[in-house]
């Protein structure tokens, strides 16, 4: 049983690290060229969906999971809380922060102007998210 | 964006390539062992294909120093991190092949088990590995969801072509592999699979 949990968890953590790195790379390319290629657009669409899940997970209060999306949202919320790059004092502050990140990603996708601070905030979140997940996946591997 | 010296970048790429070469040797050793059909070899072949792909991509980056020097440091870092982590993941996957060799596993049970599963499972595209391990535990471990998640996020989904859509590991304690109750324990383990398949 230990094996099963370890493998599934390790795969998920590694997958999240790879996902976050793609977003970071897309943001980096965008910051250099102010253009989005197909790969970058795809990565940012996924980032936007992920942030939606975090918000859904944060607002989840039914206590019963009705769909795979519910489970994924709750998981996304928990993982995002662990990766937060700023100090927040409450859940509502946290969700507001995630909402801001989502709005920035939406603006990038829509080719709208964003400030340097907005860009730095999204970049910091996904860099930390990726780094934490790679660290956690390695931590599971070490005792194997 | 700060740029690493081309020498340092090439050195890091070479380190990763060396890991890949070492893994190739281990994978060839594993492939040379005898296993009951067909799960262990399918998993080893998947690891070999993936390792070869990683090796080719690293070699291509190293082959052109001018191009390499032009790639921003962050891009190289992210690319290397993905490949290094994937190599470790392939290493992890190979733990499921160890103990599946004919001489160590309850290999005579594999063919009857395959017939039984073919008869009762609705999913036709499956494979499995039966192995004896040091854990005193009987278990069934579905691998495919984890593999698909990692491969799709690493953009290596194409390497899964031909790999079964269901793949699982059936574990038994090494000391119990010749004991009669193993039939009951395996029936219990594949029963969970059967229920999952029916729901």
Image (tube, rainbow, N blue to C red):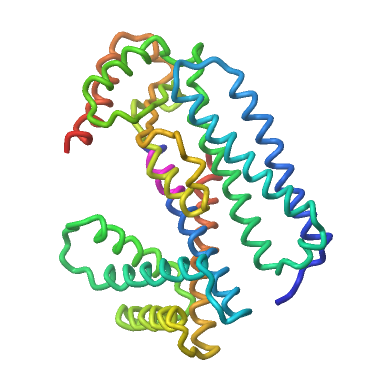
Residue B104 location (% of width, % of height): 49, 15
**Residue at x-position 62% and y-position 29%:** B27
Q: Residue furthest right?
A: B7
Task: From this view, report whether residue A123 is shown above or below residue B107.
Answer: below
How many discs mark residues in the rendered view? 0
Where is residue B65, by image quadrant? bottom right
| Residue A105 falls within the magenta-colored stretch | no
Where is residue B164, by image quadrant? top left
**Residue at x-position 41% and y-position 66%:** A46
Residue A139 location (% of width, % of height): 53, 51
Q: Is residue A10 left or right of residue B197?
A: right
Residue A135 location (% of width, % of height): 54, 57
Of residues A30 and B99, which is closer to you in this image? A30
Task: From this view, report whether residue B64 is shown above or below residue A58.
Answer: above
| Residue A9 falls within the magenta-colored stretch | yes
Where is residue B116, by image quadrant? top left
**Residue at x-position 41% and y-position 37%:** A3
Query: In which quadrant will I find the N terminus of chain A?
Result: top left
Residue A98 location (% of width, % of height): 38, 78
Task: Decide whether the magenta segment is chiefly helix, strand or loop.
Answer: helix
User: Is any atom of residue A18 visible in this view?
Assistant: yes
Q: Is residue A127 left or right of residue B181?
A: right
**Residue at x-position 47% and y-position 66%:** A43
For the magenta stretch, what is the residue range? A4-11
Task: From this view, report whether residue B19 is shown above or below residue B175.
Answer: below
User: Is any atom of residue A127 visible in this view?
Assistant: no
């Amino acid at each position: 049983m230990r094996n099963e949990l370890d493998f599934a968890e390790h795969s998920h953590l590694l997958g999240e690290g790879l996902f976050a790195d793609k977003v970071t790379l897309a943001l980096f390319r965008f910051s250099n060229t102010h253009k989005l290629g197909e790969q970058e657009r795809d990565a940012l669409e996924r980032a936007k969906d992920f942030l939606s899940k975090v918000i859904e997970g944060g607002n989840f209060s039914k206590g019963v999971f009705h769909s795979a999306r519910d489970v994924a949202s709750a998981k996304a919320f928990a993982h995002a809380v662990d990766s937060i790059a700023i100090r927040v004092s409450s859940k509502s502050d946290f969700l507001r922060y995630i909402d801001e990140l989502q709005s920035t990603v939406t603006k990038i996708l829509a080719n709208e102007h964003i400030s340097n601070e907005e860009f730095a905030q999204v970049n910091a979140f996904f860099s930390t998210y990726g780094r934490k997940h790679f660290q956690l996946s390695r931590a599971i591997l070490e005792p194997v | 964006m700060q740029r690493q010296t081309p020498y340092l970048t090439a050195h890091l790429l070479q380190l990763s390539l060396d890991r890949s070469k070492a893994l190739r040797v281990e994978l060839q050793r594993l492939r040379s062992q005898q296993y009951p059909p067909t799960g262990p070899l399918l998993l080893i072949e998947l690891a070999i294909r993936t390792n070869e792909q990683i090796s080719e991509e690293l070699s291509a980056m190293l082959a052109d120093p001018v191009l390499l020097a032009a790639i921003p440091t962050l891009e190289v870092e992210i690319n290397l991190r993905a490949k290094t982590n994937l190599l470790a993941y392939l290493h992890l996957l190979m733990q499921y092949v160890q103990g599946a060799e004919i001489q160590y596993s309850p290999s005579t049970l594999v063919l009857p088990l395959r017939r039984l599963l073919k008869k009762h499972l609705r999913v036709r595209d499956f494979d499995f590995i039966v192995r004896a391990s040091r854990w005193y535990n009987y278990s069934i471990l579905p691998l495919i969801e984890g593999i698909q998640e990692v491969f799709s996020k690493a953009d290596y989904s194409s390497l899964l072509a031909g790999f079964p859509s269901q793949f699982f590991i059936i574990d038994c304690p090494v000391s119990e592999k010749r004991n009669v109750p193993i039939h009951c324990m395996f029936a219990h383990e594949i029963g969970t699979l059967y229920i999952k398949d029916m729901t």
